[in-house]
Image (cartoon, grey):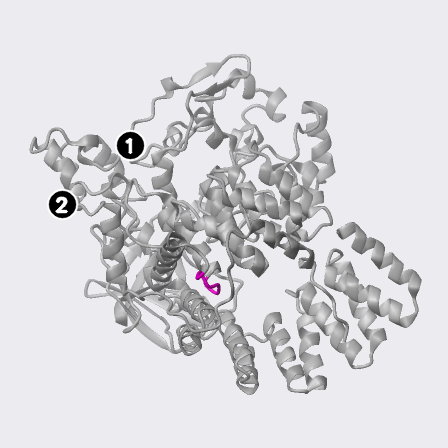
Amino acid sequence: MINIAGRNSSLIALVSLLLLAGCSRDKDATPVADEPDDSKVSSAVSLQQNHLSIEVPTYSGSTSCSGCHQKESTAWEGSHHAHAMRSASEESVLGNFNNSTFTYRGITTTFYKREGTYYVETEGMEGNLEEFPIAFTFGVAPLQQYLIQFPGGRLQALSIAWDSRPKADGGQRWFHLYPDEIIDHSDSLHWSGNNQNWNFMCADCHSTNLQKNYDLNTDTFQTSWSEMNVACESCHGPASKHLEWAYGQQPNLENFGFSIELQKVNINNWKMNLDSGIASIKAAKTSTEMQICAQCHSRRATFLPGAVPGSQFLDHYNPALLQPPLYHVDGQINEEVYVYGSFLQSKMYAAGVTCSNCHEPHGLQLRSNGDGICAQCHLPGKFAQTEHHLHPVNSPGARCVSCHMPAKNYMLIDSRRDHSFRIPRPDLSDQIKTPNACTNCHKGKSNQWAAEILRDRFGPPERTHFGEALYAGFSGQVDAEGKLSELIIDSQQPTIARATAITLLPQYLSRHSVQLLQSIAQGDQPLLSLALAQSLDRIPEPLRPPLGIPLLYEPERVTRSLAANALAAFSMENYSEPVRQQFSLALREYVASEHFNSDRPESLANLAGLHRQRGNIHQAEAFYRRAIKKAPDYTPAYINLADLYRAEGREKESENTLRKALGRAQGNAAIHHSLGLSLIRQGLHSEAISYLKKAAEAKETDSRYIYVYAIALHSADNPTQALAILEKGFEQFPTSVDILQALISINRESGDLEKAKKYEAFLAGNN
């Protein structure tokens, strides 16, 4: 066998420079933390947020608001927020329930009404046609979904939805949200499955003061809300104290009795620069309003419950950064990401623009029609000119949003615009594999054609785009480390792009980049600290404590909790008592979060991983098994359980677990790879190679899978085939150190020194 060192081996010399105190792996079983039930988590969070106040404001309902705020209430009543979720009734149901039918993959679903109740007959969770009453409507335009009650407090969202657009626009019809997918009753995407569960997937952003209340022991929900839809107190907070202020009972309450004050937008605070044609505002800063809107209008995981208006976003939510496939590498929207991550990239956000500058917050309509919304801050005399937009006046291409806010459909018919307000960059599209607004409209024209037009009119771009560095990081380019490092330290670039670069840096570490991460760990920028915490478990073990210990003291709960989890396998004995206490606190917060989300297989697997790190093998096995029972097609739980069995010397159980996983995911490269390794450990080399081959040839393969397959062939006295596999792998992964070093070794072994030197040159370039 060829023994090839990893690229991070040279970093160990840095440990003595960075370690604050000795920190070793804990070999003995260590208690995780108290594992509270959901009600205890909610109570603890509520007390913490209200500073142990005895008199906590309570929710009063939107009817208590309309008496004094009639204009706002009337606008809200017609909004999507007001119609976010309603009981199924003649007033709320838009779909055709007049014995209409819809056929998907050979299964005919029928919609009908009987004695005032709406019903659907469709494929149930066992694969048979069943009748289900419709409990609630979900949404209103451009589509409406329907929720069905299941035992255990579950609500499930039917995958067949009603297109509520006018018939002339293609609407007034039933359609399936996944028309190109083959989804049967055993699939997690089936409407009765985990990924269509309202309690987790949808509920907290469609109702006011939602409490999920999941009980892991009984596997049931007791989900509750103050109001079924998104009402006044979702954004303003509990109103009981405000009502006391309004009725003169406590006239001196700060913020009129609310925990925060949402100020009305005043466009007169913005001053127009007549030379540039762009308005600006003094003292631009992140607004309270943005923190509130982001709670729902972002792609994020709920970390802990209890968020109210005024709560710190990163205390309760773990936001997605600019990773594919959610975003293109330049930050353009790809999958459904809900605005916030896009807006953080924009010059608008940097200049101090906030949501209500453009969106009226009660009726949710734009404040002006067409380009008038942009003209608030961008002089039409400068920008609504052919010299700027390069299209005929009043044509679709002349609209601001056509170039700066391109749209994409989600759920087939729901058109949503990219809120990064970017300048089109067709010059980058071929280089970093991204779309652009120009050739999205001008079909058949090349990216180069569009780039030349923009260059002739406006000159070359002023600065490097952060997408170039992220592309280098995601694609494993030779100069990725340098580009990522430059992006991270460039304070003029969007913070969310710099944070994304931090998550990519661990695979390219050198002395320089480790020192850069150390400065991030000691810094005061919350999103950068969060990114480091998110990627801490991918950093070599000797470097984790010096980078992770400072993160335990971050004010943001998500950051310090993720850091504690990444440090869970280490002993804190050699640290001071304050450090040990802070670690214990942060780890308890992490455990509370995973228990809050234990209705999901991912959180059950995370708890299993934590128990394993702490040496609690039986508990780890039990949680992995729970994850598999919860979601039989969740393959990471099988793979990790099999690895636990491997580490415990239970190789046959490891093999059997992986074979069960293959029954659920025949084409999964990771399963084939893991099963191949298990068989090698059992001495079954011939059968093992067949599985390693499937992993290496899979569509979603990895450079490591190709490398291991080639080494297995080499060990089986087949160096010629091994070289062929490695050479093909090199074409696919030209910066893989493993593949390059194997090519060098095997070519030297076979006497082809010229080829060996060629690959040595590539390797030197990588390093």
* Amino acid type, label 2: Glu
Q: Of helix, strand and loop, which one carries label 1?
A: loop
Front in this rendered view, residue 226 or 542: 542
Q: Residue at x 67, y 42 (%)?
A: 483
**Which residue, as the protein is rendered here, is positioned at the far top?**
274
Q: Is residue 25 above or below residue 370?
A: below
| Numbered disc in front, either 1 or 2 | 2
Q: Are marks 1 and 2 in contact (CB under 8 Å)?
A: no
Front in this rendered view, residue 443 or 726: 726
Front in this rendered view, residue 23 or 120: 23
The answer to which quarter of the image holds residue 95 is bottom left
Horizontal arrangement in the rendering, residue 217 relative to residue 556 (left or right): left
Horizontal arrangement in the rendering, residue 552 relative to residue 456 (left or right): left
The magenta segment is: 568-573
Is residue 569 part of the magenta span, yes or no?
A: yes
The answer to which quarter of the image holds residue 162 is bottom left
* Amino acid type, label 1: Leu
Q: Can residue 549 be seen?
A: yes
Percent coordinates x, y for residue 34 in the rendering:
31, 66
Front in this rendered view, residue 603 or 423: 603
- For label 2, the residue is 55
- For label 1, the residue is 262
